Image: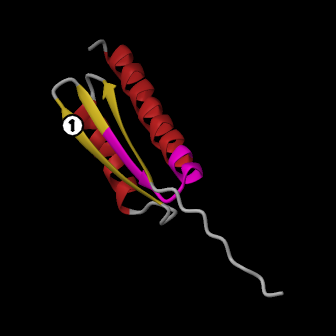
Amino acid sequence: MGQVERRLAHASSLEVKIQTLQAETILKAIAPELESLPTRRVKAAISCLEDGLILTLEAEDLVALRAGLNTFLRWISAIERCLSLTERESGI
């Protein structure tokens, strides 16, 4: 009996609105990461709004979608924390 290859593909997309006052700075910091994602299973885009960012992810499967979402949300959170620390230190 021959082996049958099963491929379960569940294309997924997600759009998340992130409210932040530092949207432009965060976008500039993350832009290089968009150019060189470590996997081809997920595509990401980020754009600015008046009051924040829109993060759009498209993935071949739910695992890749979750990994991409976790990665970008952690980067955004880390950048935002760094910015708030520098603002606090400089008295802005």
Q: Quadrant of the N terminus?
A: bottom right
Q: Quadrant of the C terminus?
A: top left
Residue 50 part of the magenta segment: no
What residue span does the magenta drawing correspond to?
A: 55-66
- Frontmost residue, 21 versus 61: 61
Residue 17's image quarter?
top left
Residue 60 part of the magenta segment: yes
The three-letter amino acid code for the residue at tag 1 is: Cys
Residue occupying image coordinates x 40% and y 54%: 33
- The residue where tag 1 is placed is 48
Compared across the picture, whether 62 is left or right of 91 comes to right
- Percent of width and height locating residue 49: 19, 32
Is 16 drawn above or below residue 90 in the view shown?
below
Residue 54's image quarter?
top left
Residue 9's image quarter?
bottom right
- Percent of width and height locating residue 74: 50, 36
Residue occupying image coordinates x 32% and y 18%: 90
Compared across the picture, whether 69 is left or right of 21 comes to right
As drawn, the residue found furthest toward the left would be 50
- Percent of width and height locating residue 28: 27, 44
> Which class describes the residues within 10 Å of circle 1: few (<14), some (14-19), or many (20+)?
some
